[in-house]
Image: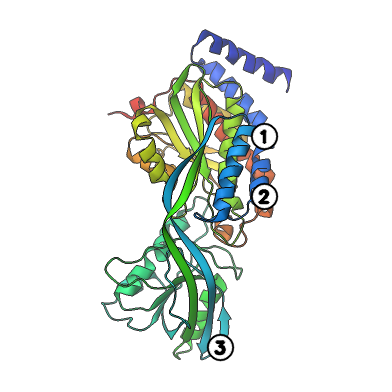
Amino acid sequence: MSRRLVGLLLGVAALAVAGLPARAEDLAAGAAAVRDKALADGVAWSLVESLTTEVGPRPTGSPAAARARDWAMARLTALGFQNVHAEPFEAEAWVRGAEQAEVISPFPQPLHVLGLGRSVSTPKGGITAEIALFRSLDELIALPPGALKGKIAVVTQPMTRTMDGAGYAAMNRNRTQGAAQASRRGAVAYLVRSLSTDDTRLPHAGAMRQATDAPAIPAAALSVPDAQLLERMAARGQPVRVRLVLESRSIPKAPAWNVVGEMPGREQPDEVIVVGGHLDSWDPGTGAVDDGAGLAITTAAAKLVGEGGPRRTIRVVMWGAEELDDSGEAYAAAHKAEVDKIVLAAESDTGAGPVWQARLPKDSREHPAMKAFVASLAPLKVIVSRDPATVGGSDVADLIELGTPSVNLTPDTSRYFDLHHSADDTLDKIDPRDLAQSVAVWASFLYTVAESDIDFRALAAP
């Protein structure tokens, strides 16, 4: 550690002894110091390397999910976090079985698919049926009830590559709602082009929801090239028949855990900053970018800021059932009584790319703490948007609905959707330098919030 860095941190420590929030100039100096330390810190890389190597894929309800819980508690303890514990709850689990798809006619070929979470199994021997192909989900929805009777509905709409994930947001309903819409029109199964920007033959998994007013049907994601293959076959004007075999089982109430560790506040321990990432993952890859990177980034940032004793408590949560949307609701329910004391809640869950944009809590930009944070971002090439933060992550959405402020620290997702939910979600896709840049942004933000008296609720009040 350099003499300058030591001097800066000692200056802030002197204010800690006095029991006062850091002054604006000290916040700026401290934020810059922790930023520079983060850029040379290897904790985040160590965490995601360990998780993907020692645990691997960890779907909710699996034996690996229990191993991930134990891993998380051991790691947080070793890093110096206090009050480390697992908060149990019951969550939905979905277990993948055998899967196969192929074109039967007019041009027999195998297809590469992954069943979607909550899909039901096909009948024994599978389903063989003619496909009805649509270039968008809206084309399918335009059909009347019964129009797809006995057919396998296929939606092949492509996804746009963007830095901010907007392409995924626009296409998400194709995966989550498509089977329900197809079933309402009589379809016996549903296939969707993977929500992916890659060009490999690896399909991308993900969750879907069955209709409550129509039969549950089997549903799977096609690899991008196979979706294009079906388009070309259908364009030749002959009926295309596909055989689909999917086996799976659902567990309505499986054991799950949110793992928690804290860096207790020295002056305001009851004022809590909640950050983290989700511990569960889909099964094709090892859950490196989704979301090993996110929990590693926030944990490393919290350790850097917290090891000197933050003024406010920093709490890291590794949520245990995000992929089927259960862990955030469970966490909010368990902590509803302390919501008024949660200063801010945010999750890192869009990969390991460098942070390129920050959206701050509403009307907070002119506060000295946020000015200090913004000043620290200059060397990191981060844009500070004039738009306020909206969603802070799916696991904190329920806290936000209860009035908790949040922040959006958005990484570059240009490549994230090549990898996410696929067999390519592995450690080798993470650049340690990008990971360190994200830690630096998060650490600088946590420092300015933890060491100040900023009250985001009061700033946003009408």
Q: Where is mark 3, residue-wise?
A: 108
Say the numbered circle drawn on residue 39: 1
Residue shown at 33%/35% (left/top)? 403
Measuring from the top left, give residue 428's x and y in whole percent. Answer: 69, 54
Is disc 3 surrounded by few (<14), some (14 to 19) or many (20+) residues within 10 Å?
Answer: few
Q: Amino acid at mark 1?
A: Leu
Q: Which residue is outermost to the right?
A: 2
Say the numbered circle drawn on residue 419: none
Q: Is residue 374 visible?
A: no
Report how far apart the C-alphas of labels 1 and 3 lie in the structure.
53 Å
Q: Amino acid at mark 3?
A: Pro
Say the numbered circle drawn on residue 54: 2
Report how far apart the C-alphas of labels 1 and 2 lie in the structure.
25 Å
Measuring from the top left, give residue 360's x and y in whole percent. Answer: 44, 34
Residue shown at 45%/63% (left/top)? 117
Q: Quadrant of residue 344?
A: top left
Q: Nearer the viewer, residue 381 or 158?
A: 158
Q: Quadrant of residue 192?
A: bottom left
Secondary element under disc 1, as helix, strand or loop, is: helix
Residue shown at 50%/11% (left/top)? 19
